[in-house]
Amino acid sequence: NESKVDGSVGVDPPVTGRMRSVSISKARLPPTRKQLPWRPSALESRSKEDVRPINWANRPKSYVMRTDDWDEFPNGRWGDCSSPAFGELSDVSHFYNFSLGSEEDRRAMLGTNPTRPSDVYEVFARYVENKLPHLPWCETPLQPESYLIQTQLAALNRAGFLTINSQPPVNGAPSTHSTFGWGGAGGYVYQKSYCECFVSPENANKLVAMVTDNPSLNLYAVNIFGRELRVGAEEGGITALTWGVFPNREILQPTIFDPKAFLVWAEEAFSLWTSLWLNLYDFDSPSFELVETIRDTYYLVAIIDNDYMASTNGGGVGGGGSLWNALLAVGGVDNDGGDAASTKT
């Protein structure tokens, strides 16, 4: 993911000290080893929670607040997020807005006077290059697991594919892997390639064509007005994106994609264009109109590559794989991060 930080509110617990639901002794987990791909909440009511949708990976405090009134939290499997047992995930009245600093700080980070789409694209590219610490959709800097695809991400953003969440493929990496490991020693972890980005309607159509031609890919997309695009996906299908196999335990699948949860997240994601970016500029100014046009016309797209084995050449950790190569081709970018058209002789 672009970043994964603590999902607790007002408490900064140590990484160890939870996961009673799978009977792991605290002593068996080194202090620096993650129990899950995301950091568990310190709240007692969430002590057995071990499954979350990927969409809030970079805004975990928002997820914790938006699910605070749930009667129970997913343990072992995600279930149905529209079930009354899970409360009102769709309640948007109190989702968390972290601060990007003063208005002056935000202008310095997001652009004093952007007038062209490329000005906005550059902000996203600079974030994935670790030249900016935050985006409205990402609370912390890019995390080490995305360094494998950092060059591709920067090139995609400059081509107008504005990424806010991503992960490379992993096929059977040791659970003690320094970057991808979680859950304690003796296991193996897996994950599918995932990319979530804002794109123009033109690029959304290109991505639909790309996924249509590639049976291993699924695409979900929606714009601010609720118009949906889906390719290669059955209605209501919930997909495990990260899972692990450990001795003496059932398979764990702590990160999933749920189309219903994605639509809830999309409403929040589009609102952040307004609350943390658009309001920096005077109404009817060129900068205001630029950001407003992006907010009102772009799609939020989520793409899953189900073929994690091919993406990693049969085993271990992949450097990107077929999804990222396909995205670069759609964006007209070569694998070195340059404009493909400019490299032709």
Image (cartoon, grey):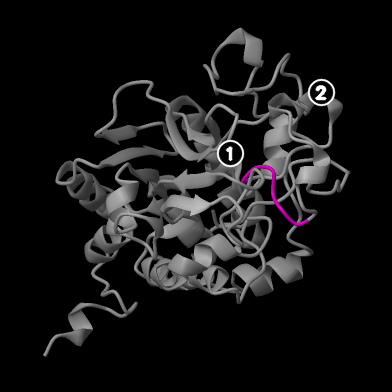
Q: Give the prevailing secondary structure in the magenta stretch.
A: loop
Camera sees residue 151: yes
Residue 340 place in picture, x, y as percent: 22, 77
For mark 2, what is the residue? Answer: 45
Camera sees residue 96: no
Horizontally, residue 305 falls left or right of residue 8, namely: left
Horizontally, residue 182 falls left or right of residue 270, namely: right
Look at the image and say whether residue 202 sits in the magenta stretch. no
Give the CA distance from mark 1 to mark 2. 25 Å
Q: Amino acid at mark 1?
A: Glu
For mark 1, what is the residue? Answer: 268
Q: Secondary structure at mark 2?
A: helix
Above or below, 328 against 224 in this view is: below
Q: Residue at x 59, y 23 (%)?
A: 76
Q: How many marks?
A: 2
Quadrant for residue 21, please give it.
top right
